[in-house]
Image (spheres, grey):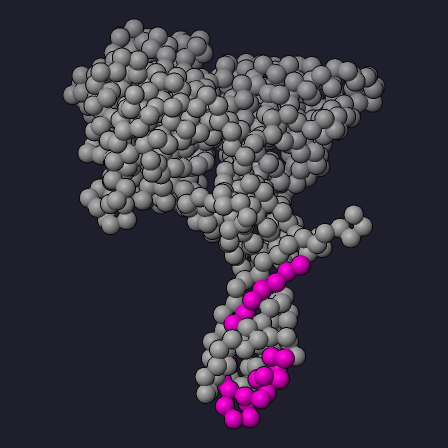
Amino acid sequence: MKLSGAEIFVETLKKEGVKVLFGYPGGVVLPIFDVLYHEKEIRLILPRHEQAAVHMADGYARSTGNVGVALATSGPGATNTVTGIATAFMDSIPIVVFTGQVPTPMIGVDAFQEADIVGITRPCTKYNYLVKNTADLPYIIKEAFYIASKGRPGPVLVDLPRDVLANKADFVYPETVSLRSYNPTYIGNRWQIKKAADAILKAKKPVIYAGGGVISSNASQELKELAEFTEIPVTLTLMGLGGFPGDHPLFLGMLGMHGTYAANMTIHNSDLIIAIGARFDDRVTGRVKDFAPNAKIIHIDIDPTSIRKSVHVDIPIVGDVRLVLIDLLKELKSMKETNEVIEEARKHWAKQIKDWQKEHPLWYEYDDEVIKPQFVIEKIFEITKGDAIISTEVGQNQMWTAQFYKFLKPRTWLTSGGLGTMGYGFPAALGAQAAFPNKLVFDIAGDGSIQMNIQELATAVIERLNVKVAILNNSCLGMVRQWQELFYGERYSGIDLGEVPDFVKVAEAYGAVGFKAVKPSEVEPVIKEAIKIKKPVLMDFRIDRMEKVFPMVPAGAAIHEMIFLEKKKKTEKMKVVR
Amino acid sequence: MTHILSLLVENKFGVLSRVAGLFSGRGFNIEALSVAPTQDPSVSQMTIVTSGDDRVIEQITKQLNKMIDIIKVSDFSDKDYVLREVALIKVSAKGADREEALRIATIFRAKVVDSSPTTYTIEVTGDDKKIEAIVNLLRPLGIKELVRSGPIAILREDKNK
Ligand SMILES: Cc1ncc(C[n+]2csc(CCOP(=O)(O)OP(=O)(O)O)c2C)c(N)n1
Ligand SMILES: [Mg+2]
């Protein structure tokens, strides 16, 4: 029996196991929406902006590990998806974005709502397609899901001309995909793994530096085993948080620009870095030429282009992080020999790291009068016992959360790391909530960022996605303000957001619930109340406007050259965290 | 250092722009690029001349290998290969210069493929040194137009096999 392209599209999505579709309609994709009208197996969630649809698919993908799916119409619908796609691309998140296109005979004539979205997204997708024949739909969609999720994950875009959706063809779903030009390496080279194991046994000052690859390959269990078996301390990148328990004695905290002093010093002084699913991003390495001057580097990554892109690597291992770690552990267990000199050195190393931890722990000054943002984050952790999915926006709110929330499990942390997209957190949280209706999902937001997708309150209310948004409201673009204070002579330019809007009223206008907290004593009751209410809640925490993110590696410095919160302020009120 | 990369790519719409986009997006050099079909209609062959230090060339080859539409990447640079380029040179040739132009063409085993009372169009095949050499000799006569194909290359077969 012949089906229309739109029917084939929906049938293929079902075969791919799609349960939720974040989609916004428009002229050329109406055939799809018409099919969805009768569809029971796929939940259609209507966002209020196509960018948000893509972030929702992204949040869905990060929290579940499955491919997230978004749909937009041609022209402006398609161009609105670009920021969402670029966000997923930079963080290697598996999503498939479908866009409508004008009918094939009209492509290239500047038709109404035509945009060359395949051309526009070429540099920010892992791959993209323009479908030219209805009969090609099943295999192209199948390939799109395959490419998005296999190897190093990433976004794939499929452009669907209107006639391709309207025409009929036989529906033949291919059971398998084979691409002669795409064969990622999953199993690490045995000899390289042997070499790595050998280097690990011989290292006197080793450290594990792990990133988002641990999350995407579901390797957190193996990472924990490796760390515990070898007793090597672990630092995580922003993307890696949750990949190793945040309360583990071997955990050093995050590294990099706003990492802990101990993590950065450990990396800087190490003689062996075991890099696992991380890519030596410039926010991590600081000034590259002074990065870890005495370290040998083992680099495990599924993407060969990540290896030796910015730093020299001594032992590269291309492969799936999880599979490589399994082999590496086997190797280490088979050769574990004791060497007194090394053991003695390791003891010194552990002691040295403890000293660094004591010298400059993460801390902030608690205040009885004004709310400190870190206090809010600690309270959220305490009250949820760390059993929540947390997204953030971008800016100080993001860095404070990374520092002060102890992520215990993978896939509970959603943040735009590579692109740093303000406006990401709220829709991403909604996507995660759609995947896990019974879980607590928080967006820890800035007052600036939340306004970049605040219209999604409507989606939250109508779709009953009861996300709790905690706005750390400093009435300004705080991170930019921090840079202007520290590096631009306190010339505050273009950062004042005023006391606008009244977030409580905004929440109420959308039919959500709004709370405002001004005093530290109000923080806990507000969070508890927000959790109790079975509705989306916007919490407006009026925080100390002057609060900054510390420690910090200034731009262009090496990672051990950190600046700290001034010590003279350290009083009995000081709160040491890690 | 200059490297010659030979790629086998899927003969699909948009592949050339993907490859070109990779080079421009990541700030890599392209000195020359040619694309042509192979015996297999689903596969095209690309020859790219690029330059950079070892780290850059390593990145370029890895990035190319990573592209979904690229089937195979070979760097010919430290291998034994034959490289050829075609140049078409339209040169002024009046009076005594007509003789001179023909003489130069003969030395380089080049062919005259078109002529008018005041010009010759000369076709020459070779590597870039040979092409530059003939161009330098013809220049005093007055080159009106010069078109080069960009190089193509193929590996030499192992003579001991
Ligand atoms: C879309 C976008 N525009 C601009 C920036 C640059 N930027 C980074 S942080 C920041 C300030 C964010 O302000 P807010 O959301 O209030 O967070 P805060 O730093 O105050 O916690 C800006 C403007 C960005 N990351 N993303
Ligand atoms: Mg702010």
Q: Position of residue A192 (x, y in %)?
A: 72, 30
Q: Is residue A555 magenta?
A: no
- How many labels sit on residues? 0
Residue under the image location 52 percent in, 93 percent down: B95
Residue under the image location 67 percent in, 53 percent down: B155
Q: Position of residue A521 (x, y in %)?
A: 33, 12
Identify which residue, A84 or A455, lies in the foreground: A84
Query: Measured along the vertical axis of the image, is residue A478 above or below residue B63?
Result: above
> In the displayed structure, does residue A371 sit left or right of residue A462?
right
Q: Is residue B88 magenta?
A: yes
Q: Position of residue A183 (x, y in %)?
A: 56, 32
Q: Residue furthest left?
A: A509
> In the displayed structure, does residue B11 sit left or right of residue A524?
right
Query: Measured along the vertical axis of the image, is residue A294 above or below residue B146?
Result: above
Q: Position of residue A23 (x, y in %)?
A: 27, 26
> In the displayed structure, does residue A237 sit left or right of residue A503?
right
Identify which residue, A398 or B93, lies in the foreground: B93
State which quarter of the image contains the N terminus of chain A.
Answer: top left
Residue under the image location 55 percent in, 82 percent down: B139
Occupied quadrant, residue A434: top left
Q: Residue furthest front?
A: A1
Q: Is residue A39 visible?
A: yes
Residue under the image location 33 percent in, 38 percent down: A132
Q: Residue furthest top?
A: A532
Identify which residue, A325 or A149, lies in the foreground: A149
Identify which residue, A389 or A139, lies in the foreground: A139
| Magenta segment | B82-106
State which quarter of the image contains the C terminus of chain A.
Answer: top right
